Image (cartoon, rainbow, N blue to C red):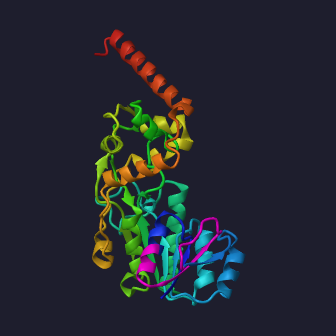
Amino acid sequence: MRVLIIGGTGKISTAITRYLLERGESVVHYNRGRQPAPEGVATVIGDRTDHASFEAQMREAAPCDCVVDMMGYTPEDAASCLRAFGGRTGHLIFCSTVDVYARPPRAYPIREDEALGGRNTYGRNKVVCEQILMAAHERGELPVTVFRPAATYSDEGWLCDSFASGTRTLDRLRRGRPVIVHGDGQSLWVATHRDDVGPPIARAAGDPRTFGRAYNVAGEEWFTWDRYYQLIAGAMGAPPPTLVHLPTDLLAQVSPSRAAICAENFQFNNVFDNAAARNDLGFAYTVPFVDGARRIIAWLDAHGGLDNSDDDPLYDRVLEAWARLGEAMVRELSEAGGR
């Protein structure tokens, strides 16, 4: 089978590529050529966002049995994908996201038939992409399968957090400095290693059972955000963390660029049902989060260390302001007989 991956060198794409190669498939990447492809993988260099050029390149390329679109973010991308591959491929796999779901959901765990909505531009665009592609599937233009991963990490990189950027929260944890947590720290979070997300997507290539379906591929180890930071601290040998809870809406106003995701996603429980991917495609959660966190920390320490949290003065100003204003509020209400 000849499989074209639009992207190919990102977190999830890397795992998909590796699994396909191990299975003996022929793999081609389409990307800007900024990262080297694995041995045995051909790369077509181009810019997917230049739709006319992309479509021309795909018309000139040899047909593929399956196309895996890891770089479709806008309705225009989805429409371009149909023009490029309609009638020219036996199967299109589209990487979407759990951010397409309406929040809060009707019930937990969130299944693939949950109402779609999306609370940010990224999620809403992915909803429209799915709708465009599934409509083409229903018209018989080409078979389509959709995957919805949640937060996915690799051994190289960083972990999601409430307020800091880069790896500064990890530095704060290692140094025993207070860490901001949105809300009361009790919403549920889930994270999945790419080695668990990639294989079921690769297995779907050319599988008729998956045509016209959507699949969750998320983690299965749910923990509160408080517990999340405690696990990371333990994984890096840091002291038990001092966690400071701030209202989610307030954080989002203090710094929309950092904390909007808390209001759009983190404040809600991220608990997803993977039964369909498990039954059809052998999805399995095999990398415990603590092990994954240890691997990330080890990689970061071996490649330049953590970002210095001293370079983020806003973080400590927020903590100082919260402590000061909270104390003033308690004092004011106490003096007024509020107790």
Compared with 224, 40 (above or below) is: below
User: Is residue 48 placed above or below 98 in the rendered structure?
Assistant: below
Position of residue 237 in the picture relative to residue 56 (left or right): left
State whether residue 225 is above or below residue 99.
above
Q: Nearer the viewer, residue 79 or 203?
A: 203
Q: Which residues are magenta?
A: 18-40
Residue 195 position in % (x across, y down): 39, 66
Q: Residue at x 37, y 55 (%)?
A: 191
Residue 11 in the image: x percent, y percent?
48, 63
Please provide percent x and percent y for residue 134: 48, 78
Q: Can residue 331 be seen by looking at this rendering?
A: yes
Quadrant that contains the C terminus:
top left
Instruction: Inspect this view and state whether residue 96 appears.
Output: no
| Residue found farthest to the front | 302
Which sits in the foreground, 173 or 223? 173
As drawn, 25 above or below 331: below
Counting labels gives 0
- Residues 36 and 75: in front is 36
Indicate the quadrant where residue 41 lies: bottom right
Is 161 magenta? The answer is no
**Place of residue 23 in the rendered image (x, y in percent of width and height, measured from the top left):** 41, 82
Asked whether, in this view, residue 326 is left or right of residue 66, the answer is left
Q: Identify the residue at image location x=64%, y=86%.
A: 61
The residue that appears at 39% across and 17% down in the rendered structure is 327
Q: Is residue 33 magenta?
A: yes
Q: Residue 154 falls in which quadrant of the image?
A: bottom left
